[in-house]
Image (cartoon, helix red, strand yellow):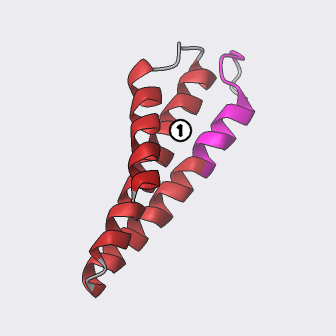
Amino acid sequence: MSPDGARDDSALQEAARELEAAIHDARVAFDCIGLGEIDRAHTSALTARVAVDAAVTAMQSALGLPASQSATTNAAGVTRLIADQ
């Protein structure tokens, strides 16, 4: 926690976990492209994007900012795209 108390440690931990997940999913997408598994690469790229959006939301919470409408909308849209595959 920062000295001014403005940051929420649990939200920052969640942001870090989501960024780690995004890194993993992006690496999987990269490897799948190399293997010619384009459908799986697409799915992994989408899940990486959702994880990044979740990290942004967690960081906004830690900073005391209102949650971004676009991050929530993007995550819902990507979730629908994955489900439709």
Residue at the image point whose x is 68% and y is 15% from the top: 4
| Residue topped by disc 1 | 54
Residue positioned most to the bottom: 35
The spot of residue 7 in percent (x, y) is 66, 23
Q: Is residue 58 left or right of residue 39?
A: right
The spot of residue 37 in percent (x, y) is 31, 80
Task: Magenta stretch: give its range.
Answer: 4-17
Answer above or below: position of 77 versus 49.
Answer: above
Q: If the image is split into quadrants, where does the N terminus sit?
A: top right
Answer above or below: position of 43 versus 63.
Answer: below
Q: Is residue 3 left or right of residue 83?
A: right
The spot of residue 76 in percent (x, y) is 46, 35
Q: Camera-side residue: 83 or 25?
A: 83
Q: Find numbered disc 1 in the image and state the secondary structure of the residue it sits on.
A: helix
Q: Amino acid at mark 1?
A: Ala
Residue at the image point whose x is 57% and y is 48% from the top: 18
Magenta stretch holds residue 9: yes
Q: Mark 1, residues whose alpha carbon is within 10 Å: few (<14), some, or many (≥20)?
A: many
Q: Quadrant of residue 71?
A: top left
Majority secondary structure of the magenta segment? helix
Q: Quadrant of residue 31?
A: bottom left
Q: Camera-side residue: 18 or 29?
A: 29
The spot of residue 44 in percent (x, y) is 41, 63
Residue at the image point whose x is 25% and y is 83% from the top: 36
Residue positioned most to the front: 84
Q: Quadrant of residue 33?
A: bottom left
Residue at the image point whose x is 55% and y is 57% from the top: 20
Magenta stretch holds residue 41: no
The number of callouts visible is 1
